[in-house]
């Protein structure tokens, strides 16, 4: 049963990202709507914000009242390390969600992608090691692997394409009074 839930959790996470993007694109009222740059910008936005929200949900699982069940679903026992990963999840999830603010795009987006790449690839490698070396086939160990390795390059590609097609253009800088 837990294995099916983990599969559904993975599918729900990505369905929210894809459907959210599609609805946002269909209802977009931006002057740049229906341009390739805007489509890439919205796709990148939904990966960053949608997965950020999912990471925040993971943080709640690690540090919230269900932390023991969360640990079991990954094949671990509760420990201080789970508490620390939960707080890291909170930071990384918040980085993604805050990319929703237009003012936070650009350099903030770059920082989020760099942080996510290091964190998620490290998590992904850890999940693979648990699977291969220790035979940990618990659902949330195995079903975390695709997202860990898919999000950083997908997010970076979409942001790159958005910028290449005119989205995320820097705003003219305002002089700073000294």
Image: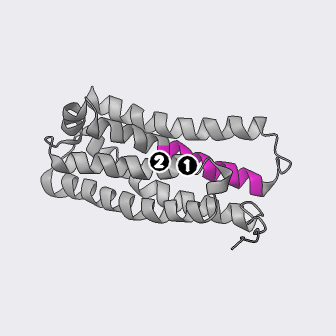
Is residue 17 rendered to the left or right of residue 103? left
- Above or below — where is 34 with respect to 118? above
Question: On residue 21, which mark appears?
Answer: none
* Residue labelled with disc 2: 94
Give the CA distance from mark 2 to mark 1: 6 Å
Residue drawn at the location 41% of the way across and 44% of the way down: 55
Q: Tell me where residue 18 sits by quadrant.
A: top right
Determine the main secondary structure of the stretch shown in magenta.
helix
- Above or below — where is 11 with respect to 51? above
Give, as a single range, the part of the protein colored magenta. Answer: 37-52
- Circles 2 and 1 in contact, beta carbons < 8 Å: yes
Q: Position of residue 123 (x, y in %)?
A: 31, 56
Is residue 175 rendered to the left or right of residue 45? right
* Residue labelled with disc 1: 98
Residue 97 among magenta residues: no
Q: Position of residue 2 (x, y in %)?
A: 27, 29
């Amino acid at each position: 049963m837990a294995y099916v839930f983990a599969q559904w959790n993975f599918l729900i996470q990505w369905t929210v990202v894809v459907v959210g993007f599609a609805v946002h694109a269909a209802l977009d009222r931006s002057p740049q709507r229906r341009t390739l740059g805007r489509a890439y910008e919205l796709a990148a936005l939904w990966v960053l914000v949608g997965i950020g929200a999912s990471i925040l949900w993971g943080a709640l699982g690690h540090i919230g009242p269900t932390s023991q069940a969360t640990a079991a679903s990954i094949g671990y026992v509760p420990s201080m390390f789970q508490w620390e990963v939960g707080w890291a999840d909170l930071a990384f999830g918040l980085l993604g969600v805050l990319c929703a603010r237009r003012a936070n795009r650009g350099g903030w987006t770059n920082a989020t992608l760099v942080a996510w790449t290091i964190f998620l690839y490290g998590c992904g490698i850890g999940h693979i090691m648990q699977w291969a070396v220790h035979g940990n086939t618990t659902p949330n160990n195995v079903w975390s692997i695709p997202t860990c390795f898919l999000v950083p390059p997908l997010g970076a590609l979409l942001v790159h394409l958005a910028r290449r097609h005119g989205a995320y253009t820097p705003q003219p800088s305002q002089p700073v009074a000294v």
